[in-house]
Amino acid sequence: MSVLVVGLSHRSAPVSVLERVALSRDAQGKLLADALGAEPVTEAALLATCNRVELYAAVEKFHGGVAELSTLLARHTGLGLEELTPHLYVHYDDRAVHHMFSVGCGLDSMVVGEGQILGQIKDALGRAQELHSAGRLLNELFQQALRVGKRAHSETGIDRAGQSLVTFGLEQLAAGAPVADWAAGKRALVIGAGSMSSLAAATLVRAGVAELAVANRTPERAERLARGLGEGAPGQLVRAVAMAKVREELAAADIVVSCTGATGLVLTAEQVAEAVAARRPPAGPPLSVLDLAMPRDVDAAVHRLPGVRFTDIESLAEASADAPMAADVDLVRALVSAEVAAFGAAQRAATITPTVVALRTMAADVVEAELARLDGRLPELDGRARGEITQTVRRVVDKLLHAPTVRVKQLAGTPDGAGYADALRKLFDLDQEAVAAVSRADGSTAQDGPAPQGFSGPATGLGDLTGGPADNPMDNLTEKGGHG
């Protein structure tokens, strides 16, 4: 069984496409259910953020897995397969693990080094566990990605290479001034009460805004967020407001951050223009608007309005392309490479376990059968003598099996280790069904058949996925050396 990821992100698709593939929570659950029902897929998990939609799966067949996952992404996002294909990328086996760990460390984020992705990976794993779509392989992959990400932040200076998307967005609005100096004393409005909006609200409070209003379609969530922030900032006014009051609050605000799960616009250009016209004094600083939602909350036409400084996901993508890279990024890349090698070795070693268990079970059965024969041939043996013989026979068998089983586990962890399980089965004439029964019991299986090990590439040519049986949907896939 191998890991396969098919997805798209800010690196492979423009914001206009990412907006259209955004999935609601219900849609994500349906996608996972359909993925789990696909013939080559045994496990599935979905990492869906503002900047990426990635479907992870444990698959038995590479080509069939790519075809199924790509088709499912197209069906559930509503984009045609031909339209979606040019923006998809495919990572397989070790390259899929490398991509996951790189994402967890923030190396693949729009703002390199940002730490919010760890919370999103944790949420994705929790969702897959809740829906029972993640098994042993994906559980271990996601949990290890979280550990690797935490190592990257604690053992290197990757945090110096970038910040959260919220901080980066506010820095763009501040136009070079320290965010704390720029935001101090201002009035802010945050629309939404999810993780990103909560982070934005907390960042603004820490930056010293004089007043913060939180609006959300679920009033209780806005009130809970405002209450929690207000308790930690006694000198600042933090309050919840109804969504119906957003227009009124907009006219009074200096800073607006919007990040909701709405499928349509939350703020139109007309509404923002009206708010600017109603501001007092009219010639004051521009209204600063940050849209962190995907799909967008704020009409892109706001870019053209006078008296407004507007930054959205697309603008941040362009700005982050020129952001300086810290030397610590190289350290994180080295850390990721080492962790990928260790993870691969552990997974390969795990494939030998069912065979070893089956071998020891067979040996135990042989011992018991021979002891039963001894009882029949020497019924006069007393209990003490029989016990000594039993212990001696078992010790001999254990010693004979110890070295080869330990060594085969070590060899199975090497890149060429996949064949050692087969060799062990043939040498000891093990029943294949006995090995398979152990695999089913512990949730592990042997590596699947021939496939492009470590494949990583763009899904160019996936438009043929609906072709007949003779068509190879991967004929035009070109392998790339890099990751993500």
Image: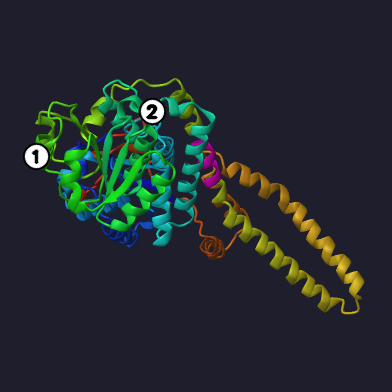
Q: Is residue 142 visible?
A: yes
- Type of the residue with mark 1: Glu
> What is the x, y in percent for residue 289?
21, 35
Q: Main secondary structure of the magenta part?
A: helix
Residue 112, relative to residue 391: is it above or below?
above
* Residue range corresponding to the magenta coloring: 338-347
Q: What separation in Å lies between label 2 and label 1 (alpha carbons)?
A: 35 Å
| Badge 2 vs badge 1, beta-carbon distance below 8 Å | no
Query: From what the image shows, is residue 436 above or below residue 287?
Result: below
Report the number of discs.
Answer: 2
Classify 10 Å Cα crowding around label 1: few (below 14), some (14-19), many (20 and above).
some
Whether residue 449 is visible here, answered yes or no, is no
Measured from the top left, where is residue 109 in percent x and y?
A: 35, 34
Residue 193 spot, x, y in % from top left: 31, 49
- Within 10 Å of disc 2 (Cα), the crowding (few <14, some 14-19, many 20+) is many
Residue 339: within the magenta?
yes
Q: Is residue 480 magenta?
A: no
Going by the numbered disc 2, the residue's amino acid type is Gly
Q: Residue at x 33, y 53 (%)?
A: 223
At mark 1, the secondary structure is helix
**Residue behind mark 1:** 274
Q: Secondary structure at mark 2?
A: loop
x, y percent for residue 245: 19, 50
Quick one: 326 or 308, which is closer to the camera?
308
User: As displayed, is residue 385 above or below residue 45?
Assistant: below
Name the residue that disc number 2 marks.
162
* Residue displayed at 35% across by 60% down: 36
Out of 61 and 279, give the one closest to the viewer.
279
Asked whether 186 or 197 is in front, the reply is 186
Quarter-of-image position of residue 296: top left
Left or right, 72 with respect to 235, comes to left
